[in-house]
Amino acid sequence: MGHPPRVPVGTMATTRDYFVTICVANRRRVLANEFALKAFKAAVGKLDNWKVFCAMLMPDHLHVIAAPINNSRREAWKFFRRTKRWIRQELNASWTWQPGCFDRLLRADESLHDKWLYVEANRVRAGLVKHSKDWPYQNGFDDSL
């Protein structure tokens, strides 16, 4: 069986923007609250090599769109690992994260804004709110992290 075709280098985003989903172990519903949002903001405040564009806390997982300032893939794993650790520390959490995370490197033709619109619709699809603007546990393009 052949390998899938390689993606041409020219199609990759130049700033290495990541779409990341981090889940709580056993999908415990512990993140959709002000304490978790505050803990996330504190964790992001400790990052010195990353630009976080937007984030959304769902009850059992977290979506983040971010980019390393130095474009290092190795730094990406540090970002994921540290963010998870710092949030748990800030909350003094008894729960844990699932191992690893889902991270996707966005390609040049993928709009950050379009990806964020998909994330915003997540809470409506889940039946948590009728209108995406009603979900308080987020920081989007119009909010300051």
Image (tube, rainbow, N blue to C red):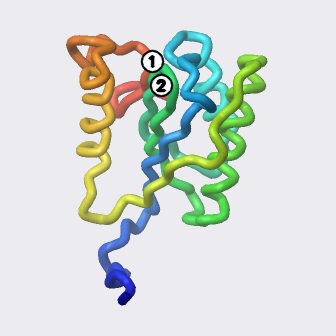
Residue at 47% from the left image edge and 25% from the top image edge:
57
Q: Position of residue 41 (x, y in %)?
A: 59, 26
Q: Quadrant of residue 141?
A: top left
The numbered mark, 1 or 2, whose residue comes first in the sequence reads: 2
Relative to 80, residue 110 above or below: below
Residue 37 visible in the picture: no
- Residue under circle 2? 57
Give the label on residue 137, or none.
1
In the picture provided, is 45 more to the left or to the right than 3? right
Give the alpha-carbon distance from disc 1 to disc 2, as whole Å. 5 Å
Is residue 24 placed above or below 110 in the rendered structure?
above
Q: Amino acid at mark 2?
A: Leu
The image position of residue 8, as x and y in percent, is: 33, 82
Q: Is residue 67 above or below residue 65?
A: below
Could you tell me residue 123's position as x and y percent?
32, 23
Residue at x-position 63% and y-position 39%: 98
| Residues at circles 1 and 2 in contact by the CB criterion of under 8 Å | yes
